[in-house]
Amino acid sequence: MKVTRKSDYGLRALYTLAQQYDNAPVSIGQLASEHGIPEPFLEKIMQELRDKGFVEAAHGRGGGYRLKKRPTQITLREVIRALDGPIALVTCLDPNLKCAIELQCPTSSIWEIINAKLEEYLASLTLEDIVQKYQTLKVKVGAKPSSPRL
């Protein structure tokens, strides 16, 4: 499984919304500028996140996006699945694909275990964890990096 640019950008935008959870909505322009994301692509991602129930849009002056749930209630697994579909490290684990040697493959059971552990770990991480981890990193480094790294 490769985390796509779509999930990467979506998580970056959600990171900012998690930071701003109790504040005013964040505009698409601010999100795009802060993270170096092309605005039209980010708008599509945000619409998808809105459709999947992660964010809500406030229209008009001072409008933008905000989280619908607390940052502690949104896991990385949920976001990645919502934007990229099933998490599958190899073809045989993707329900949308068919592996030609699946029944004779000596490694598929190991990939199942690894995939399950990855999903379990992603399910244990929330947007709040990203915020906390990045704040800790900023304190250690002593300066704010140009963009957050997961």
Image (tube, grey):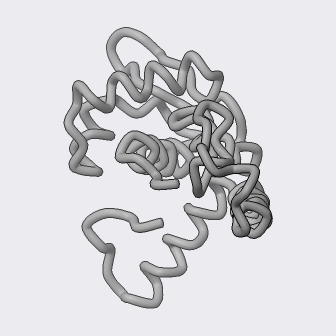
Q: Is residue 132 left or right of residue 28?
A: right
Residue 126 falls in which quadrant of the image? bottom right
Query: Of 115 and 100, which appears nearest the observer?
Result: 100
Tally the marks.
0
| Residue 99 image offset from top left, x and y in percent | 60, 44
Q: Which residue is found at the position 35% from the left and 46% from the top? A: 5
Q: Which residue is found at the position 58% from the left and 48% from the top? A: 91
Q: Is residue 75 above or below residue 44?
A: below
Residue 71 visible in this rendered orientation of the protein? no
Residue 67 falls in which quadrant of the image? top right
Q: Which residue is found at the position 71% from the left and 41% from the top? A: 70
Query: Of 108 and 31, which appears nearest the observer?
Result: 108
Q: Is residue 46 left or right of residue 116?
A: left
| Residue 56 image offset from top left, x and y in percent | 56, 20
Q: Is residue 143 left or right of residue 22?
A: left
Q: Is residue 126 above or below residue 26?
A: below
Q: Is residue 135 above or below residue 48?
A: below
Residue 44 falls in which quadrant of the image? top left
Residue 53 visible in this rendered orientation of the protein? yes
Q: Which residue is found at the position 57% from the left and 44% from the top? A: 80
| Residue 130 image offset from top left, x and y in percent | 57, 62
| Residue 48 image offset from top left, x and y in percent | 49, 22
Query: Of 98 and 66, which appears nearest the observer?
Result: 98
Q: Is residue 22 above or below residue 35?
A: above
